[in-house]
Amino acid sequence: MFLEAVSSLQNMMHYYVKQSSSSEILVRARSLMLIAVRRLEKEFHTILLENRKVMDKESILGWSSPRVSPPASSSTPGFTEDDRVHGNFISASGVAMADLKNIADTMIDSGYGKECARIYKITRKSVIDETLYQLGVGNLNASQIQKMEWNILEPMIRNWLHAVSVAIKTLFHGERILCDYVFSSSEIIAESCFTEISKDAAVNLFNFPEFVVKSKKNLSPEKIFRALDLYEAVSKLWPEAESIFSYGSLSPVRSQAVAAQVKLGEAVRMLLDQFEAAIQKDSSKTASGCGVHPLTRYVMNFLVFIGDYSGAVTDIVADWPLNIPNPLPESYFSKPSDDPSSEAVTEWLAWLILVLLCKLDTKAALYNDVTLSYLFLANNLNYVVSKVRNSNLGDMLGPEWITNNGSKVKQYLSTYERMGWNKATSALPQAEIAPEEAIECFRRFNLIFEEECSKQKSWVIPDPELREEVRLSLKRKLIPAYQVMYHKYRRAPRMESIIRLAPEDLDNYLSCLFSPAPDTTNTSSYEPSLQSSPSHL
């Protein structure tokens, strides 16, 4: 009724203005209008204050996806049965929003839109600022962030990743809906209000990723995954942010979001280059017992996680191409792709693995025993193939890559067996021999077999399946031929003092080979040029 009376008063004033601008009735009407506007201002402010929690409940406590359209009361056009299901929250917020809209419409029609907007800006801006403060992203300072140690900054990044999603999808989205709804009768006022309450906070929110990548002391290859997390977050939120901050006056928000994405992409690209350079420069020693080298573990763990970010890395490579010798050997890159940027990432992965394997070749050459070198290469390449097969890298590099390199593992093992055990197999007769010759065969075989077992007792094959495969292969090569000679000549004269090993002993000796000690499966001591694992693991 009061709003209708104000509208009637406004209409009457328009009438008397046309009749006489100095009419006593008009002067009286203007006084009444000022009184009415003051009351409307007070009521508008009161509704905003009293319903802060009602209208903020979804954005602060609900932490759910924002509604596509503004909630409404049962007396507001557009109210649906779905709204009723949500109970008092929708009803209370709908009543408040409807009242705010009606007051705003009346004040705008009466020429007091600026006064209404001023109250709205002050009240709702404080809501945004307080909510962001509660989310832990209220005041992000560049100089402070750039001076932070990683153990302090990294939890802030995790918090920001969660907070930015809530802020964009719920807080700013909800405020845009509320603002557009309340000031639906004036797009200019709606834009002015939303810009005033959101611009500074949103720009500050999107400043954070850029502040992080400007912190040079915290930029190293193992930190790349947090940079990729930030890049993915900004990329995924960009369509919604672009829609929410679509007003021309909010272009600084859109520009900052784009700038954050660009800076993150540049940082990731730089860290990828640093990662490759670190592999090239690595000068760590060989692994004890010819097991999997710490460099191999680190590089492959790194690449596996890069594979989990294939979408983001593909986008980054499309904008900042990687430097790769072209063309790569066909055996290292043979999977076609219709997407040039996706193919570029795959080729880069294949190239980095090739760099790693070349580095491992140089480390293998440091072993004094060539046989040990081949077992070292087999262990490390098998680890690489296993990591590729059991991760997204398998889909990226393709089955042919896995097959080709799996065959190389077998070739390395075949060479190891030939060089390490050929003397032992050669000591076993391939045809009928005299008992006197058998004595010499047993002596030679015993000596060679025991020497090899003693020499290789510290050699390891970390992969259980591969370890058992090599054991079985050696048993098939040695035990059947030895068993024939053993059963044929064990009762011959003088053999009792010559034969020291039964076939079962060979089996037992070979079954004990290659088992890693409990502390050789982990490689926490590796620190020369790369950290032992990605920082967020």
Image: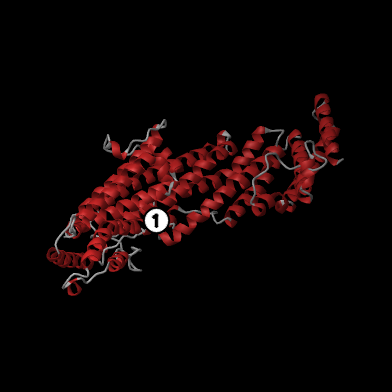
Q: Residue at x 43, y 48 (%)?
A: 391
Q: Residue at x 79, y 51 (%)?
A: 88
The image shows residue 483 at horizontal and vertical percentages of: 26, 62
The image shows residue 274 at horizontal and vertical percentages of: 31, 48
Q: Badge 1 is on which residue?
A: 534
Residue 355 appears anywhere in the view = yes
Looking at the image, which is closer to me, 493 or 331? 493
Query: In which quadrant of the rendered image does the N terminus lie?
Result: top right
Query: In which quadrant of the rendered image does the C terminus lie?
Result: bottom left
The furthest residue to the top: 18
Assign a secondary structure to mark 1: loop
The furthest residue to the bottom: 497
Looking at the image, which is closer to me, 330 or 83? 330
**Splitting the image into 4 quarters, where does residue 476 fall?**
bottom left
Looking at the image, which is closer to me, 290 or 223? 290
The image shows residue 273 at horizontal and vertical percentages of: 31, 45
- Eyeballing the image, is 504 above or below 129? below
User: Seen in the image, is 225 located left or right of residue 327?
Assistant: right
Q: What residue type is disc 1 on?
A: Pro
The image shows residue 93 at horizontal and vertical percentages of: 75, 47
Q: Residue at x 45, y 43 (%)?
A: 260
Q: Residue at x 40, y 55 (%)?
A: 146
**Splitting the image into 4 quarters, where does residue 499 fall?**
bottom left
User: Seen in the image, is 471 located left or right of residue 396?
Assistant: left
Residue 531 appears anywhere in the view = no
